[in-house]
Image (cartoon, rainbow, N blue to C red):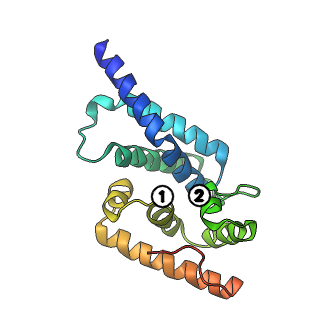
Amino acid sequence: MRDDVNAKEAIRSLYERYADDVYRFALLTLGDSTTAKDVVQEVFLRAFRSWESFRQNSSSRTWLMSIARNYMYSELRKKRTERKWLAQNVVSEAVADSAGKIESMMMWQDALSRVPESYRQVFVLRHVQDYSVHETVEILGWSESKVKKTDQRAVAKLREIFHSNYGEVMPLDAR
């Protein structure tokens, strides 16, 4: 019983610190706020269930994001549906905060919907969520070189999209 109390307290604390990060990752990956909220609930439920097996080799934030990624992939595989990134009328809060204008948000929505899912994931984790390369490696389960290469390709592709479609330079400072 005492272990359950400790786990509940730990997960409650993690929820308060990282629920917004998990939500933003799910929203920017799936494009649907209702589904993103469901992901947050499921991630913290799974974290509670597996608390005793958490070896703390990685940060708790990275661990939670890995749970989120794995859950989202398993759900997408089950449904076998093609999804659209950022469904109509859903505007990314993170991009909204960064871009500042509705027009810019719409351009971001369009540009990100045009790149492969792997590019979106890496770009969102690195440039919107501000995760380090190492944290992104842990979340995605990729090699460091794959994360760096995918990030470079994502930034290049997004720059190309902004230039060719809008005649503008990409509004966020991509690393």
Outermost residue to the top:
1
Question: Which residue is nearer to you in this view: 58 or 102?
Answer: 102
- N-terminal-most mark, 2 or 1: 2
Circles 2, 1 touching at the beta carbon (< 8 Å) = yes
Residue located at (47% from left, 44% from top): 71
**Element under label 2?**
helix
At label 1, counting other C-alpha atoms closer than 10 Å, the crowd grade (few under 14, some 14-19, many 20 or more) is some
Q: Measured from the top left, where is residue 16 in percent x and y?
A: 47, 35
* Kind of residue indicated by mark 1: Gln
Q: Residue 47: name its quadrant.
A: top left
Q: Left or right: where does residue 89 sit relative to residue 48?
A: right
Q: Amino acid at mark 2?
A: Ala
Quarter occupied by residue 14: top left
For the point 69% across and 57% down, the residue is 91
15 is higher (above) or lower (below) than 165: above
Q: At 34% across and 24% down in the image, what residue appears?
A: 7
Residue named by callout 2: 94
Residue 167 at what x, y percent from top left? Answer: 69, 88
Q: Quadrant of the C terminus?
A: bottom left
Question: Position of 31 compared to 44: left or right?
Answer: right
Q: Who is closer to the viewer here, 173 or 42?
A: 173
Look at the picture and state if 175 lies above or below 69: below
How far apart marks 2 and 1 lie (CA) works out to 8 Å
For the residue pair 59 and 99, the one nearer the viewer reads as 99
Report the disc number at residue 129.
Answer: 1
Identify which residue is drawn at 40% across, 43% down: 64
Q: How many marks?
A: 2
- Above or below 9: residue 150: below
